């Protein structure tokens, strides 16, 4: 199976995976097709579908089927159906930010920070717990920009435009009370529900091994590969901060991490030296995700 998925994808591959994604989203929402769920499902589908195009723009996966397949498998395992509208918005905005920041046209990328700032502010309005994404963009500007001050100004100007529009609309509608949720720094939910996540431990361990292997062979990699992999790691760190501080028992937060996880794991398997080890690693990931998904429908009484 690994050898089959290691083949280069073509222009018809992404539409096929998006079709599978549509089937997954519809299947998990068909029993509860309320208006709110319909909106959330549509935004979730759009956000995850955009993620397929991020693989090509990042250029770390050699245009193979493997990361696309892993990405789809992660969606199947982690998508609950009734996804919170805030997380749905976060998935959508994260994909747009990644597509903008990885654009090959440097001029377009540098002139898009007003848009990125506006998107970050919109993301914060719907889900304040995603504030670490702003840190990711700030670090990206520091690491890649030749005019840091100008790009910081554009970023915060975009945020300011959305903030003023939001507060102006709220004032016009008579919404004068402050919601404590917009200050998500006082109450965290960093409890680790090991009993419910135990079947994802192999995947987590493989991610750790992959990052360790990357730094172990750091000097052998090209400057472009180092830069792009660092980009993915910083993005992953921003999502991990959100997951660790706020997830609690809301495991759909893990969807924020599936794009970088698919890239990191696919690269790990590609550079394993023995074919049987590549195949075993692939099936270990798939088996872990399938068992985790089964646990959503059949409660597993595990004492830890």
Image: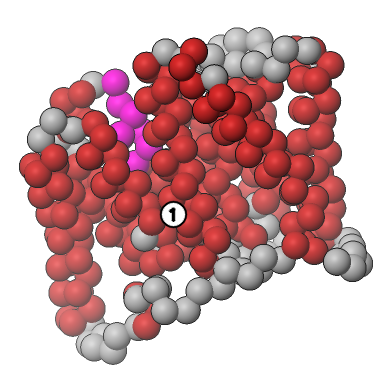
**Residue 296: image x %, image y %?**
79, 59
Q: Residue at x 63, y 70 (%)?
A: 191
Number of numbered discs on residues: 1
Q: Is residue 131 above or below residue 281?
A: below
Q: Residue at x 57, y 33 (%)?
A: 211
Q: Say left or right for 219 vs 160.
A: right
**Residue 161: image x %, image y %?**
14, 59
Here the colouring is secondary structure
Q: Tell which of 267 and 16 is nearer to you.
A: 267
**Residue 91: image x %, image y %?**
47, 49
Classified by dominant secondary structure, the portion drawn in magenta counts as helix
Q: Residue at x 76, y 20 (%)?
A: 278
- Quarter of the image holding residue 295? bottom right
Q: Work out whether residue 33 can be spotted.
A: no
Q: Tell which of 171 and 101 is nearer to you.
A: 101
Q: Residue at x 66, y 34 (%)?
A: 209
Q: Say left or right for 1 vs 142.
A: right
**Which quadrant does the N terminus fall into?**
top right
- Which segment is the magenta one? 97-104
Q: Say left or right for 231 vs 115.
A: right
Q: Is residue 3 above or below residue 212?
A: above
Tell me if residue 210 is in the magenta stretch. Answer: no
**Which quadrant does the C terminus fall into?**
bottom right
User: Which residue is the site of mark 1?
Assistant: 90
Q: Tell which of 143 and 103 is nearer to you.
A: 143
Q: Work out whether residue 122 can be spotted.
A: yes
- Residues packed near mark 1 inside 10 Å, few (<14), some (14 to 19) or many (20 plus): many
- Quarter of the image holding residue 189? bottom right
Tell me if residue 102 is in the magenta stretch. Answer: yes
**Residue 139: image x %, image y %?**
29, 43
């Amino acid at each position: 199976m690994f050898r089959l998925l290691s083949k280069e994808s073509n222009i018809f591959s992404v539409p096929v995976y998006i079709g599978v994604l549509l089937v997954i989203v519809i299947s998990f929402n068909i029993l509860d097709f309320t208006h709110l769920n319909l909106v959330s499902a549509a935004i979730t589908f759009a956000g995850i579908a955009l993620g397929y195009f991020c693989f090509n723009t990042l250029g770390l996966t050699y245009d193979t089927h493997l990361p696309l397949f892993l990405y789809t498998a992660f969606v199947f395992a982690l998508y609950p159906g009734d996804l919170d509208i805030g997380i749905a918005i976060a998935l959508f905005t994260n994909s747009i930010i990644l597509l903008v920041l990885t654009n090959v046209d440097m001029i377009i990328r540098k002139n898009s920070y007003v848009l990125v700032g506006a998107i970050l502010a919109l993301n914060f309005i719907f889900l304040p717990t995603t504030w670490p994404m702003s840190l990711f963009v700030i670090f990206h500007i520091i690491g890649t920009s030749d005019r840091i001050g100008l790009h910081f100004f554009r970023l915060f100007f975009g945020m300011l435009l959305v903030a003023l529009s939001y507060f102006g609309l709220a004032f016009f509608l008579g919404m004068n009370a402050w919601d404590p949720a917009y200050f998500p720094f006082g109450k965290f939910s960093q409890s680790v529900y090991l009993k419910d996540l135990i079947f994802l431990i192999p995947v987590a361990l493989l991610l750790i091994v992959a990052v360790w292997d990357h730094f172990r062979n750091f000097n052998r990699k090209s400057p472009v590969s180092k830069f792009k992999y660092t980009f993915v790691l910083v993005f992953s760190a921003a999502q991990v901060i959100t997951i660790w501080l706020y997830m609690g028992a809301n495991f759909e937060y893990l969807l924020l991490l599936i794009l970088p996880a698919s890239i990191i794991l696919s690269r790990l398997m590609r550079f394993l030296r023995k074919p049987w080890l590549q195949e075993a690693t692939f099936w270990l990931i798939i088996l872990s995700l399938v068992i985790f998904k089964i646990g959503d429908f059949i409660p597993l009484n595990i004492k830890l």
